[in-house]
Image (spheres, rainbow, N blue to C red):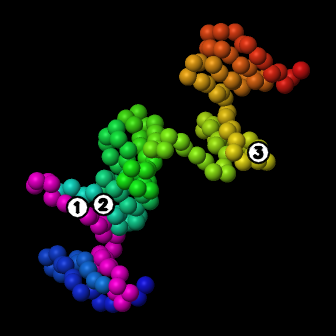
Amino acid sequence: MSTTSPQLAITYQDDTIYSTLGVNASGDLTIANAYQDADMYFGVNDGGTNVFPLFIDGATSYVGIGTTEPQKKLDVSYADSSAQLRLSQTGSVYGELYINSVGDLRISATGGDIRMLDENLWVCTGGACDNATAPATKGNLILETALIFDNDFSIEKTADGITVYASPSDAAILIFDDKE
């Protein structure tokens, strides 16, 4: 990126704290703070209240969308039951991610499917999968404990192998015992 002198400098009180706005030789718009670790707020006035939909933390370079206290490189916050993040191909073809009020991650897609292309999906508590051997092939579902269907039918890992249940209150209907 080539640099040039700023075309506009905005100062605060004694001219020691300032921000600049300019265009460099490549035609890039540049906005900079001269004050070390200065935060950048991009906002609007919403009927007398300042709202800052975009925030950059000067000390960490973390970016907040909907928050002025980002905790990661990109922190998107929207306290609603709708999606916080949308990836779109068109206005009507998209996938969304959102966190609900109890902290569960929800994923939805207008196409009706969520596909992992040439990957394995690992579902484990804590670091339980960290010591598991990775499958030699891709496209696997690796579960730590159980696969439970909406009719309560389940396939569960037990101390001795794998057990299949018709429902949680029923006796086992099939047992694969790796100890015998």
Asked which secondary structure carries label 1, the reply is: strand
Q: Where is residue 38 in the image (x, y as percent from the top left)?
A: 30, 69
Horizontal relation, residue 101 to residue 46: left or right: right
Residue 43: numbered disc: 1
Residue hosting label 2: 54
Crowdedness near tag 3: few (<14), some (14–19) or many (≥20) residues, C-alpha within 10 Å = few
Q: Which residue is drawn at 37% across and 35% down?
A: 101
Crowdedness near tag 2: few (<14), some (14–19) or many (≥20) residues, C-alpha within 10 Å = some
Q: Which residue is drawn at 29% across and 67% down?
A: 40
Horizontal relation, residue 93 to residue 30: left or right: right
Q: Is residue 126 above or below residue 164?
A: below
Mark positioned earlier in the residue sequence (2 or 1): 1
Magenta-drawn segment: 24-49
Asked which secondary structure carries label 3, the reply is: loop
Q: Is residue 137 above or below residue 57?
A: above
Mark 1–mark 3 Cα distance, whole angstroms, equals 49 Å
Asked which secondary structure carries label 2, the reply is: strand
Q: Which amino acid does label 1 sit on?
A: Gly
Tell which tag, 2 or 3, sits nearer the viewer: 3
